[in-house]
Image (cartoon, helix red, strand yellow):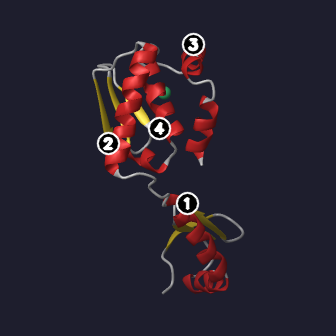
Amino acid sequence: MEPQYILIRNNIKNLYIQIKDSSVIVKAPKRFSEKQIETILKEKQKWIEKNLQNSIKKQEREEKYTIEEFTSIVEQNVKELIILTGLKPNRVRIKQIKYAWGSCSSSKNITINRKLICYSQNAIRYVILHELCHLKYMNHSKDFWNLVATYMPNYKEAKKELKD
Ligand SMILES: [Zn+2]
């Protein structure tokens, strides 16, 4: 089976193939016929498949814990960090969210991304601490980061892990 691809026609000279979020994106010059494009894609099929597989692998990080374990890790860290920082949220919930690891609303409700189930306990703790610190600073100012560092001097490691 040939892989599906997204075709974008442009005023460009050459054809480009891009693998992004496990999709194949083909940017082709306007003058190229469908047939020409198909031919090039066939030649590059091995390369496309290899890169596509890598991209899918990257998206499918493995879950490190069961949902029960994960919930209890979150609850435990929330409890500890509330005592440590003196910052108390209204409510903490775990939910799958799309564009952030966590969020903190102006009504002091904190959401922790379920996707953190694939990351270390240190990273989970960092996200909880990060959101708790937003109860004091609703921004990413220097004061905010200083507060995070006070309770987690190695927070940059966790940040790095979450970028992978
Ligand atoms: Zn933040």
The quadrant where residue 33 appears:
bottom right
> Could you tell me how far apart the alpha carbons at marks 4 and 1 are, in whole angstroms?
19 Å
Earlier sequence position, callout 2 versus callout 3: 2
| Residue depicted at x 32% and y 39% | 94
Q: Is residue 127 above or below residue 35?
A: above
Earlier sequence position, callout 4 versus callout 1: 1
> Could you tell me how far apart the alpha carbons at marks 4 and 3 are, in whole angstroms?
22 Å
| Residue depicted at x 62% and y 75% | 50
Q: Are discs 2 and 1 less than 8 Å apart at CB?
A: no
The quadrant where residue 51 appears:
bottom right
Label 1 crowd (10 A; few <14 / some 14-19 / many >=20): few
Earlier sequence position, callout 2 versus callout 1: 1
| Residue depicted at x 62% and y 82% | 45
Q: Is residue 31 left or right of residue 118?
A: right
In the picture, the disc for residue 95 is 2
In this view, the residue in front, 28 or 93, is 93
Q: Amino acid at mark 4?
A: Ile
In the picture, the disc for residue 160 is none
Label 2 crowd (10 A; few <14 / some 14-19 / many >=20): few
Q: Is residue 117 above or below residue 111?
A: below
Secondary structure of the residue carrying numbered label 4: helix
Secondary structure of the residue carrying numbered label 1: helix
Q: Amino acid at mark 3?
A: Asp
> Could you tell me how far apart the alpha carbons at marks 1 and 3 are, in whole angstroms?
34 Å
Q: Amino acid at mark 2?
A: Lys
| Residue depicted at x 52% and y 44% | 120
> Could you tell me how far apart the alpha carbons at marks 2 and 4 are, in whole angstroms?
13 Å
Mark 1 sits on what residue?
A: 58
Earlier sequence position, callout 1 versus callout 3: 1
> Can residue 144 be seen in this snapshot?
yes
Mark 4 sits on what residue?
A: 124
